[in-house]
Amino acid sequence: MADKVSFIKQVTKALGRTKITRPKDNYDTAIFEDRNLARANAAQAVADANSMAANLIDQMVQSADDAGWKVHRADNYEESAELIVGICKDHNAKSVLRSAHSVLTDIPIDRALAASGTVLEVTEHSSQSSNRHIEKSKAAAFNADVGITGVDYAIAETGTVVLHPRAGVSRLVSLAPPTHIAVLRPGDVLASLDELFAIQRDDFLNGKLQGSMNLISGPSKTADIEGTTVTGIHGPLEVHLIVIENNKY
Amino acid sequence: MKPLTINFRSKAAQTIGDEQVQNSLEHVYTGFYQGRINAAADTPNWEELRTKGKAIKDHTIAHLDHYLDMFSEKVEQSGGTVFFADNAEEARQYITELAKDRDIETVIKSKSMVSEEMSLAENMNDSGFETIETDLGEYIIQLAGETPYHLIAPAVHKSRKDVAELLDKDFEDGDRVPDATELTMLAREQLRDVFARADMSVTGVNFAVAESGSITLVTNEGNGRMSTSVPRIHVAVMGMEKIVPSIQDLSTMLRILIRSATGQRISTYVTMVNGPKTPDEEEGPDEFHVVIMNNGRLKLLKDPLLRESLNCIRCGACLNACPVYRKVGGHAYGWVYPGPIGAIVTPVITGLKDATNLPAASSLCGACHEACPVKINIPRMLLELRHKTAEGLSDPDERTSKFVERAIWKTWRIGMMGRGRFDWGARLAYLFMRPFSINGWIRKAPPPISGWTVSRDFPLIAGRSLKSRLNHRHKKEI
């Protein structure tokens, strides 16, 4: 069995050296960017997301559509609530799970769904941690009809919704139910993957990197049978993106 | 996985003669190959991204010891466990022991070529753990008891009817063949139950980030996400070359990987795992293990002329571009990695002696080099391997060139060293070859050069050189 030290020693030897040498700092890869530059990049990314929000939302809508999201534009919170209720009704959804994202309590979606008449149960999914809850929480996710989340970021380049699993934002809420609805607001949209990973790196350098991150770009799909693209294999069959254009009721 | 590289010729001939598989292989071209071309055209700074991707990989491999050290330290700092495996056997043992120790019943596997090196699913099933491939293509292949045909499309050679027979026990010859959607939904149903009860997952790694000890997974189906959401233990297996230095390198690498693989701007899911689940989370693995495997990769690293092959990010673009792969198919290559990159990696890892046909199965057209997102010069290395096998450079016992062949080439070299010798040699060759030719072509050469004409004709050398013909005409004109 190889222990770490002897394994790495073999690698060093194969590279024709006798001990590990630190790389010189003149390469084009980001690891040699200093902390200040990473901070500046991240701050710029967040500033751009706000100052160019309208423009980025337009780009996002286009690329999300390309990626297979069903995109709905809502002028305000009230309109977004109507859209979400409409989607749940279309699917005859009885059980709806949602994340704890503030946009969903701002809408407020629970009240709108309760008034819909079809939805029997709206649950904020996985907000507390205890071993007793795990099996229950998994079963709830696999049995739910619709999962609703906000977004932690969105990416205009690729039509991507970014979610960091954490308390109140469970891993399965956007994955296990056959329909996923994501709701985004102005300021959520970053220009490209560069901005997202600049922010991640800054978070890392500040000791704030989240436990994990999911980039979601459209419905689950496969082309493993005769190269034919089929939507919906292990994840949601249908994904909706609700774009709230104004932070108002 | 036991290498069967020695069967290259017979397997290739079998595939070329199989009309259905030839049709299926067309998808590789119409789907993936065209997809990549369109995606590259759609990306304004595509060449710049390729250059950057190459720089990132060149740099990482040149300092692999440093980054492996950093990566493993960071994984452990964030609560994960790292196991270094010298070979497939050790890696397999570690994972099996772990499953035993934690009373595991059901293991879900995401697509991972490294796990194919270990024949992991097969072995874990034999050890009594229900182990199920969850990538649809891999699931089909597992049901068929075969090995993957392509790096990213494992079941590309299977027809809908083949798949129906595998997925549906009641399917009989003559029944209506379900369409791709119906078949996919059938698999969805079968695998949902498996996901819900899985208590351990094994995934591959697309990129491992040294500075943060993170791993990233790229999938379209969502099985990678299931693997990191449902089971209590997540094991990620990787070849030791899979590292990038920094989180910020991911934006470049993900772009070139995905666009080169399927032509998508991004795959449906990209998951970044920075450790086991956090204390405030309900779902997610309590344990996160990373298995880093050598399994012959040191041989590639040691050789400065072959080291570049470790830059590979397993996108499959070279397979899709290769006119040979698209005819002989994935199984001809006889081990885990098919196609042009497989023709380099496979012989070095499993032994050149049985695999001499792999680097030879190329017209050196360069399409793979052109397609590679990190600009790996595959044709150069194929030539290098041909040189090595012919001369027995890595092992004198493996020298494949025969005495006669070497003598012919030595004579050729002498003949090419002066105009007079060349003319004399060409004349001699012409006189020697003429009796075997018909209308200027030799269809069947006599020994010892009969090998040349097995699959191609040889043109008869001209009776007079161009120079002498021109001289002659010149004189006439005056």
Image (spheres, rainbow, N blue to C red):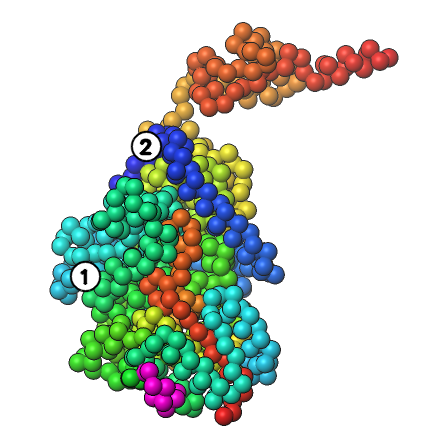
Mark nearer the viewer, 2 or 1: 1
Q: Is residue B418 left or right of residue A75?
A: right
Relative to B135, is B419 above or below? above
- Residue that label 2 marks: B6
Question: Residue B87 at x, y = what percent?
Answer: 26, 49
| Nearest to the observer: residue B105 or residue A64 | A64
Q: Is residue A74 visible?
A: yes
The chain letter under disc 2 is B
Report the quarter where the N terminus of chain A lies. Answer: bottom left
Question: Residue B292 at x, y = what percent?
Answer: 30, 57
Q: Is residue A245 left or right of residue B309?
A: right
- Residue that label 1 marks: B106
| Nearest to the observer: residue B151 or residue A100 | A100
Question: Residue A73 at x, y = what percent?
Answer: 52, 79
Please identify the quarter of the rendering in which residue B207 is found.
Answer: bottom left
In this view, which residue lies farthest toward the bottom? A249
Badge 1 marks a residue whose secondary structure is: strand
Q: Residue at the spot x=26%, y=51% of the render?
A: B167
Please state which amino acid type lies under the numbered disc 2.
Ile
